Amino acid sequence: MAKEGLNYRNIPQLVPARKPWALCIGAGTSFPIFPSWDLLAERIVLHCSKESDRTLNKIKQTFSSEVLLQSSYEQLRAKSKDIDFPKILAEFLYKDLLDSINKKDEKLLRLCLSSQVPTPNLNWDKFLNIVHKFGPTTADNLAQLVVDSYKHNADLTNIISFNAESLLPTLINAYTQIKLKKNDKIIDYITEPTTPHYSGRIPFYFCHGLIPMPNVDQKWMNASDKLVFLENEYLQLANNAFSWQAISFYNILSTNTVFFVGLSFKDANIRRWLSWLHKARTDAIDKYGGSTESTAHYWIEKNPESNHLKKWYEASVAHLGIRLIWIDDWKETANVIRHAVEKLKNIV
């Protein structure tokens, strides 16, 4: 049975001192700087075939975003065998951002977004000003939360990302330099199974790969061969229970309390992985006579302002071991987590 969602007024202490916790983020954390998953797919469909509004609406209702991307890829490949689809993805992923800034700001943006290190040689205050002009993003609040957690040893152990851009880790670098005056990395960019991870840093897993900005030549950043955007890539990942993404996901969720932010929970692979984990958890609890109505992780989502809709949301993830935390505005996200994590509760 689905548990009723929590909210800021009744949220209990979910992560006691010395208990590890993690973040899992999706495209919603980067909006409006980067387009939503559905909007990105729509733009690439139009680039591929110049469909009419009527046809576009029809295929959007019929096919999922990964199917639309796969279909676009197949049509483009029919025209040219040498199609560079990651380059097309990068073009439309970064288009709104690059079209809205001048050349001077663009240069700084490219340097910051392609740097793994919070180097003092970059103007991080200016970078934040550029980002803030787009309006508030959940990523900005989460970046400050991560830096505060690192500063106060608040047991944040991992960050899982299903985005293919580096906004959140770059914001973390910015606040690391500005708030901590620290020149060394506090996060490791994990883009493949052989990426090294160092003690004292927070691993940041790019489960769907990483697309560098157009015209940025950073070899470490180009994980376009690890992208999971097309339907075929989703299906291949689904068929491999021992992929590095799945193993990382299992390990983190089996040992941490995880807060999900900016995800729609439509991703079939995420739901499959959660289902397996929850079944193992409830079997273990049942073995010792405990209640199997257990939730170990939390999905932070905006209140739909309809009790009927809220019940649908809550029921949609109950069998995955997920409980909702309702917020009225996305800017409340970090404060909700601060309230839920004992070591962060009194840190503003």
Image: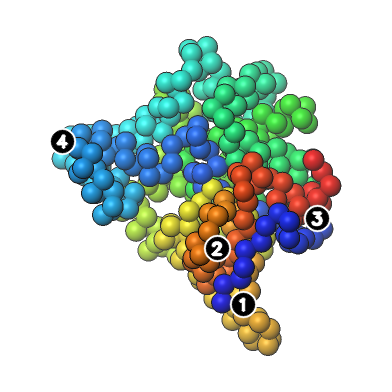
- Specify the quadrant that holds the C terminus: top right
Q: What SS does tag 3 mark?
A: helix
Q: Are marks 3 and 1 in contact (CB under 8 Å)?
A: no
Q: Which residue corresponds to mark 4?
A: 79
The three-letter code of the residue at mark 1 reads: Glu
Tell me, yes or no, if residue 273 can be seen here: no
Query: Which tag, 1 or 4, sits closer to the chain's start?
Result: 4
Query: Which tag, 2 or 4, sits closer to the chain's start?
Result: 4
Q: What SS does tag 1 mark?
A: loop
The three-letter code of the residue at mark 2 reads: Asn
Q: Which residue corresponds to mark 3?
A: 342
Tell me, yes or no, if residue 141 can be seen here: yes
Query: Which tag, 3 or 2, sits closer to the chain's start?
Result: 2
Query: Which tag, 3 or 1, sits closer to the chain's start?
Result: 1
Percent x, y of residue 136 = 59, 33
The three-letter code of the residue at mark 3 reads: Glu
Task: Choose mark 3 or mark 2, whichever is in front.
Answer: 2
Q: Which residue corresponds to mark 2?
A: 307
Q: Which residue corresponds to mark 1?
A: 293
Task: Tell me the CA gap for discs 3 and 4.
Answer: 57 Å
- Label 1 Cα crowd, 10 Å radius (few <14 / some 14-19 / many 20+): some
Q: What SS does tag 4 mark?
A: helix
Q: Residue at x 37, y 40 (%)?
A: 39
Task: Choose mark 1 or mark 4, whichever is in front.
Answer: 1
Residue 170, placed above or below residue 329: above
